[in-house]
Amino acid sequence: MALRSPNLNVMIRAAREASIKLKRDYGEVDQLQVSKKGPADYVTAADIRTEKILRGELTKARPDYGFLMEEAGIVEGTDPDRRWIIDPIDGTTNFVHGIAHFAMSIALQEHGRITAGIVFNPISEELFCAELGQGAYLNDRRIRVSSRGAMDNAVFATGIPFLGRGSEGDHQTFLKEMGAVMAVSSGIRRFGSAALDLAFVAAGRYDGFWETGLQPWDIAAGVILVREAGGLVTDIQGRDLRLEAGSILTANRNLHQPLGQTLRQARK
């Protein structure tokens, strides 16, 4: 792959260090201490420990940078223009249920722009990484979004609203969206990790992805992966993506517009 920057090397080292205990926790998932922070929204001792390790390793290497983290929130750094955006376990529900589809997500935001990101599944040892202008990679192999041009040949991923996530109206809107996409595509997948969904779009495994109700740490690293792999990323209305907006639509350049049109028509 292209020569990794010092910052990307710092991110990868931090993720690999945190993965040691995380894999041990996953192997003992039946004994994990699990508390509920909301209906169907789990936080485990592993989430908190993983985030603490990531924060410690990144702070050791870059003591001036701030943080935006899923568990601990915002931590201001002395450098006002740079911060790490961290999700220690994206796919916590999968983790708690012993499903090996979850990942650490780390992004670097500089002057308001995401400049580097990694998504690492410690069980499969798949490491997706990207830097601005340097392309996207999976375990040192260059990856690209798919080249499919027809909706009827495409497979899309999404996240499904659940108990405690979204209102009844949100659930009904999603059902309309899913019905519309089902009618014109080869299928929809829901694997339970937005970070990995985006990484899979970057690798050409999925042809596109959409979801609402997301947080910046869910998507920050995945956004740069898709863009550096040649894909398009917007919100569901087709506007420039703001991490705080909560909705995302991404696909290869052939399918982004028709997927977005299908979703927007379903919402009327």
Image (spheres, helix red, strand yellow):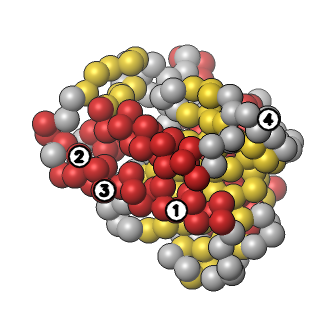
Residue 160 pos. (x, y %): 49, 37
According to the picture, the residue beneath numbered tag 2 turns out to be 25
Q: CA distance from mark 2 to mark 3?
A: 9 Å
The residue sitting at 52% across, 32% down in the picture is 70
Instruction: Tell us which disc is closer to us: 4 or 2.
Output: 4
Instruction: Tell us which disc is closer to us: 4 or 1.
Output: 4
Q: Name the amino acid type tagged 4.
A: Pro
Q: CA distance from mark 3 to mark 4?
A: 31 Å
* Dot 1 or dot 3, earlier in sequence: 1
According to the picture, the residue beneath numbered tag 3 turns out to be 20
Q: So how many labels did they put on this image?
A: 4
Q: Quadrant of the C terminus?
A: top right
Residue 58 pos. (x, y %): 55, 48
Q: Is residue 145 left or right of residue 27?
A: right
According to the picture, the residue beneath numbered tag 4 turns out to be 80
Q: CA distance from mark 1 to mark 3?
A: 13 Å
Which numbered disc covers residue 219? none
Label 4 packing within 10 angstroms: few (<14), some (14-19), many (20+): few
* Dot 1 or dot 2, earlier in sequence: 1
For residue 104, above or below residue 70: below
Which numbered disc covers residue 12? 1
Q: Circle 1 sits in a helix, a strand or a loop, which is it? A: helix
Q: Toward which corner of the image does residue 239 lie, by quadrant?
A: top right
Q: Circle 4 sits in a helix, a strand or a loop, which is it? A: loop
Q: Circle 2 sits in a helix, a strand or a loop, which is it? A: helix
Q: Name the amino acid type tagged 2.
A: Asp
Q: Circle 3 sits in a helix, a strand or a loop, which is it? A: helix
Q: CA distance from mark 1 to mark 2?
A: 20 Å
Q: Quadrant of the N terminus?
A: bottom right
Residue 25 pos. (x, y %): 23, 46
